[in-house]
Image: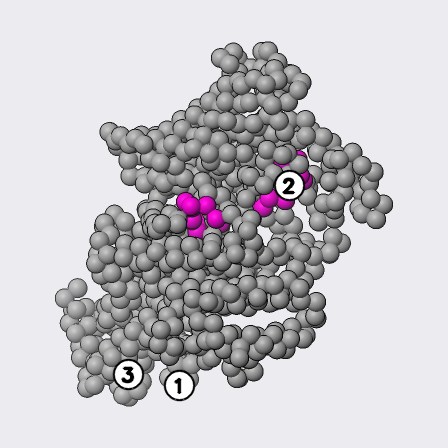
Amino acid sequence: MIATWKYAVVEWKLMFRGWFGLILLVVTGGAFAISLINNAYADDIGWYTISSSYKFMWFLFLLAPLMAVSVARRETAVKTLLIQGALPYRSAQLISARLLALIIPLGAFSLLPACFYAYHAWHAGMAFSAMATGLYMLSSFIIPTTFTILLGYWIGTWTRNRIVYLYSVAMVAGVLFLTKVVLLEWMPAQWTYLADIGLSDLTQLGFYSELWGFTDAAAYGLLRLFHIALIVLIFGGIVYSAKRKRKEKSRNTVLCSTAAATVVTMVMSALGYASIWTERTESSKESFTFYRQLLQENPSEINRIAVERFLAGEEADPNANPLTQQHKNMLLLGKKYAMLTARKYDLKVTIGEKHRMEVQSAIQLQHEGQEPMERFPLSLRHHFQIEEIKVDGMLAAFEWEPGEDVVWVVPARPVQPRTVVETTMKYAGTINDWYDPQGSGGIDDSLDAHWERRVFVDADQLFLPGYYGWYPYPGTDRLAELEQVRFDERPSSPIVDEAVRESEPYRQPADFHVEVEAGEQLQLIANGERTKSQAADGRQRVVFDASGVRSFNLIGGNMTEWSESNHLATVSIVLSNQIPPDRAKSIASNLLAHYTELSQIAKMLNPDAYYPSRIHFVRADYPGKVQNESINNQLLYRSPPIKGEFLKPIDSNGFNYLSYPNHPASMTYNGLAYFDEDLLRATVLDASIMSVPQSKLAGYMTEAISQSIGHDDTGRDEPLFIPSRHQWNGAPHPVYLALNKVYEAFGRARFPEAIRQLYEYARRYEGNEHDVDKDFIVFLNSLTP
């Protein structure tokens, strides 16, 4: 070992002689600094570090093999190769020293992302337990750096020609990128991770969550263990080859034992990863199998008018696709039990181990119909096993509807009209819902395909959205359905991808009293007021109360709900604790400002627009395609107590899930244009009845509204739209220039008047798609003097 370190010191002297060491330090530090510039996700410490380090690590991955080749062929370059064989040294010591001389400085550079993350996390007041997983994952970047050094050194021994430098770069790029592309032809994307030595883009690969931070540490650790064993195996191969070339005596027992141990480690880590992969695959397959057997409730060929005519008892429209008998039966069944509503819930939830949860529920059901019910349906996810059901304290029989998320309850006595009954249930189940997308959008989509975890219960984090159906609700509405993505959206075209999508049925508000027992380390958030909290013996009991809630959502993990208020509204948003408190408060404050001003503009454009005075937002990773297109929801539209009162696009009591483009971490950098557009389209702009030109005009209008909120026009030095950021064919976009003139003419205070005129113009526009910009510019010019 002493000799090895002496050799390493000599290698460092040779390597960093002259100005090379300083140049290497400056270039590497500069590359890391450049990667931090103009990062859209700077508000999120973890995401900022990952998205920046991904670029930096690729620079390091290409630099490392070049330096390794240089070290491997140094004797060739200085022409001492012929006399080296006569020198008394051991190949293992010399090779180890050379590799250590490279691994230590380059490994230190690969730890820069971890150091950057640790500094900012500590400065933000993050506890070590909250940053530990991130430090472990970011520190593991030293593993692929070591691999590229070994690979470059091995390639450097191939030939004396300088072309070996090109070989090393091509080989490293091929191993880190092309190998995965090739393997995608023969195996699922998840298995290609074993060949993806880099694993540096943790966000795209599913190891970083926008809401929960660094995640899936067990699978990541097994992959890295596999890569470490592979590195040891390659090192052994290099040493063994050098010894054979010099005809040194080898301790074959040691070499064989080491090789066997590394192979066993690779096999065991692969098997451990396979067990995780198998568990997720079985979960995904089970969902696909279950929902593939269901009749599609709302296929595109079903006409809404046909549903309304059938419910009204009118003759079918001969020009519309007729309803099948199955869909008619589905509507009649939903109509029969539509008058059974839930008024109050009392839920006791116990979070156990291995994704297990137990629930004791008591529901007050009100029968508003005219006929007694000898049995009634409750929607509940099929994953649960029901222990017992009681109606008004008496045991009731029950049975699952085959192949449905519906359980039929048969009480001891029929439920009488105009009465309220209490239904209690005990049920339990494993909640670990995975979806395995294989990618249907080309090679980039396939490379980014990774496990999507829709709903889950863990010891330290959970996600139980109300639309999932983890508590019972009266009726037969679908909780989820199979969605098939076809090549060109025609029913006869090939299916390129499938997904199970949740469907949130319209539900009437109810009162909730929810008691949750979980591990003490789990931070719980719900769309209800936390009224009680106790902790003892490593467990905690938290009580939430919510009044008039359409659905109850329970979320847990390393996160915080931030709230801001003014005289008009209270806005809260759930954010990962990877976002520092000062940034989180700023995001919540910006949301409040935009929400408040949007509500005033929306009500000006549409007096019926509903913006509640209190609202919760959350940006979950995979909230599914929450859709309210169930044909049974037509029944609710026809119910006078519900129509116009509860069917509002913005839920004041539940969590409002931000759409995919809305990333809280990038709201400071990119603004809130997507947030503004989503709210306006939900409350003012009905995309289903808008033509393509009208939709384009509406897009211009929402952009103008978003830009005007918070815009300071006192100095009038900066226009509403900066021309350099809105280009068309290399020149400033004429529509945005015209909007700038309108804003300058009306001013900040009177700009809503201009918005009203833009809205009326867009509603009445009848031109074609090719002339919309030209016509719109003419109209905008007419608004300015």
Residue in the picture at 61% in, 77% down = 778
Of 43 and 636, the residue lying toward us: 636
Of 338 and 375, the residue lying toward us: 338
Instruction: Specify the segment rendered in magenta.
Output: 611-636
Q: Residue furthest front?
A: 785
Residue in the picture at 46% in, 22% down = 362
The x, y position of residue 29, in whole percent, is 26, 75
- Whether pointer 3 and pointer 2 mark residues with C-beta atoms closer than 8 Å, the reply is no
The x, y position of residue 558, in whole percent, is 32, 46
Q: The residue under label 3 is which amino acid type?
A: Glu
Q: Distance of mark 1 from mark 3, alpha carbons?
A: 12 Å
Of 5 and 349, the residue lying toward us: 349
- Whether pointer 2 and pointer 1 mark residues with C-beta atoms closer than 8 Å, the reply is no
Residue 618 among those drawn in magenta: yes
- Say which element carries label 3: helix
Q: Which mark is residue 630?
A: 2
Q: The residue under label 1 is which amino acid type?
A: Asn
Work out whether mark 1 precedes mark 3 in sequence or the reverse, and give the earlier one. 3
Instruction: Provide the major secondary structure of the magenta segment.
Output: loop
537 in relation to 414, above or below: below
Q: Which mark is residue 161?
A: 1
Work out whether mark 3 precedes mark 2 in sequence or the reverse, and give the earlier one. 3
